[in-house]
Image: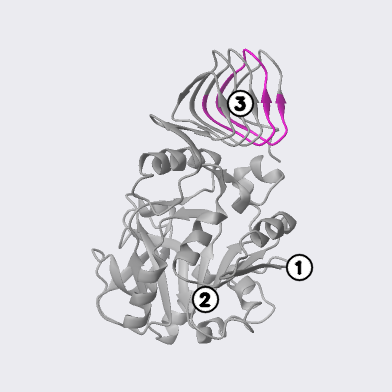
Amino acid sequence: MYGVIMAGGQGSRLRPLTLTRPKPMVELLGRPVIDFVKDAMIDASIDNIVVTTGYRGEQLKTHVASWNSSTVNAWVNQEDSPMGTAGSVRLLSEHLTETFVVGSGDSVASFDIGLLLEAHRASGAKVTMALWEVEDPTEFGIVGLSELHNGELNGELREGFIRRFKEKPTIEEAFSNVINAGLYILEPEVLAMVPEGVKFDFSKQLFPMVLEKGWPMYAKTIDGVWFDVGHPFELIRAQHTLMRQREVLPFPIPNGDFSEDSFVAESAENHGTLTGSVLSSSSRVESNSQLTDVLVMSNSVVEQECSIQNSVLGEHVQVGSGSVLKNVVVGDGVVVESGSQFQDCRIPESE
């Protein structure tokens, strides 16, 4: 079976972290975000994995090559120009001749693709979509379900046939609070509806066309966690959840020390005080520095007497002694001079 991971976005909201890497290569608990959906596909015995990409695809090629094994064939399809979510997958139509899975490379979720495949086959659907339940649906694309194909919409359902979509509804317009979680199971005849050589989107264009055609579409809400890491501070929220639920979530536990609510990678060094923070591989925090709700990516150094709160440090960052950072995102390779004070900003400033 084929699995396709979409990884073509530039991740502009994650700048400056994405000035030097594609969004799916941003790390969470020391692992590129794209690895979470890759693991879910391998767990479901998907043996061919293709990553569609455009922006900084050379980094993804090197990383995806490391997935290859005796049971998995993985490769990257580089787009010459942005084709949209469905358009990028349409480029692979010669390979996608049977039921296949499509996932987003920039979200972290506990997808049980095996259960979704069972629901897809049992329902006879042409498309099956993974859903996630939210408290506030106004920032997302919501999905309305019914118990039967072409049945009456029931906003209380968490599994059923898809009847309606709505992007970012007002509270009054919201007919459900389950949202598109960015993982789909499709039949090849659905992909054939995507016009060749045209930029085309799954949720905004293709799926409404499938509904209009009257083909059955099914959906099932996932359990566990779901994060769209589209904002740097969402990384911090995600790392808190992954650390707190590490014993029950279906993700590999990285090598290192989980102490209270923080994580220090096996090759990292901590001589300071950590609260709700992560030190990735080969990073170091020196004495009398205090980090609260901080993500330190690999090969970065925090010198003595620093105070850092609710911040993300990219790779190869050096924070000079006595610095104070609060609500700050620091891009790769940046040197923060000793005694600096920054709050509510991004360094270097995003374009």
| Residue type, mark 1 in image | Asp
Residue 331 on the magenta segment: yes
Q: Which residue has dot 2 on it?
A: 206
Q: At which x and y percent is residue 32? A: 58, 49
Q: Nearer the viewer, residue 287 or 295?
A: 287
Q: Which residue has dot 3 on it?
A: 284
The residue shown at (53%, 61%) is 38
The residue shown at (61%, 14%) is 304
Q: How is the image coloured?
A: one colour
The residue shown at (65%, 71%) is 199
Residue 28 lies, with reference to residue 269, above or below; the image says below
Q: At which x and y percent is residue 240? A: 42, 38
Q: Nearer the viewer, residue 234 or 74?
A: 74
Q: Which residues are magenta?
A: 309-335
Q: Which residue has dot 1 on it?
A: 80
How far apart are the two marked residues, 2 and 1, measured between alpha carbons? Answer: 22 Å
Question: Is tag 2's residue or tag 1's residue first in the polypeptide sequence?
Answer: 1
| Residue type, mark 3 in image | Arg
How far apart are the two marked residues, 3 and 2, measured between alpha carbons? Answer: 48 Å
Q: At which x and y percent is residue 266? A: 55, 35
Q: Are marks 2 and 1 in contact (CB under 8 Å)?
A: no
